[in-house]
Image (cartoon, rainbow, N blue to C red):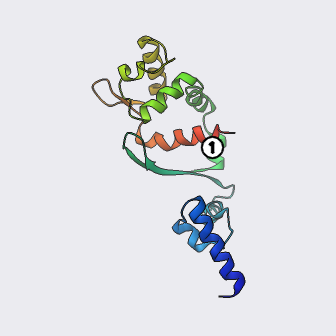
Amino acid sequence: MDLEGRVAELERRIAALEGGRTTPAQADTAPGDELWAVNRLRAEFSGSGVTNGGVLVTGSGRLPAGDEYGWQMAFTTDDLLLDDADGAAECLAALSSPVRLRLLRAILAGRRTASDLAELDGVGTSAQIYHHLRQLAAVGWLQTAGRGRFEVPKGRVVPLMVALASARR
């Protein structure tokens, strides 16, 4: 390997140590290819005949309560642009309340009952909490887990994390 290649490899390894780990998918990309996921997705979509591209949502991890999650879903651009706007607006509107977002975050962190949630400052009365929980459940952000316990469905954890991440500035 020439000097330039060795320096590039060292820079890649230092970046991996400073900013996280290198994934197997990065192994087959050129050093410095910061859009490796985009390039692989573009190739995947074009290989399957999708002409306008799309979005891949994926994530895995462990929540503070210890629950493990892993999820992925691909959406074509055409499907997303032609999707039911009313349903999407209703689902996103449920996340527009700071109280509902606090409740969802608390549930992800392990507070699972209305009485646990009522201990949080600024979330309102028990009746108000149940109102928020019903709104979140109606659009699929929550489900009951028996005995008055609530949980974010496994298939909604990553989309919720993506919604929270997309709200960052």
Instruction: Look at mark 1 in the image and give the residue it sits on.
Output: 80
Q: Is residue 160 left or right of residue 1?
A: left
At 29% across and 28% down in the image, what residue appears? 146
- Give 24 or 49, whichever is nearer the viewer: 24
- For disc 1, the neighbor class at 10 Å (few under 14, some 14 to 19, many from 20) is few
Please identify the residue farthest to the left as the structure is shown.
Answer: 147
* Residue 1 in the image: above or below residue 69: below
Label 1's element?
helix
At 65% across and 62% down in the image, what residue appears? 42
* Residue 4 in the image: above or below residue 158: below
- Give 140 or 53, whichever is nearer the viewer: 140
Q: Is residue 18 left or right of residue 68?
A: right
Residue type at the position of mark 1: Leu
Q: Is residue 67 left or right of residue 98?
A: left
Q: Residue 20, how many percent across, how many down? A: 56, 59
For the N terminus, which image quadrant? bottom right
* Residue 2 in the image: above or below residue 58: below
At 61% across and 68% down in the image, what residue appears? 14
Q: Residue 86, how many percent across, how many down? A: 61, 28
One can see residue 95 in this view = yes
- Give 85 or 60, whichever is nearer the viewer: 60
For the C terminus, which image quadrant? top right
One can see residue 73 in this view = no
* Residue 120 in the image: above or below residue 50: above
Occupied quadrant, residue 137:
top left
Occupied quadrant, residue 19:
bottom right
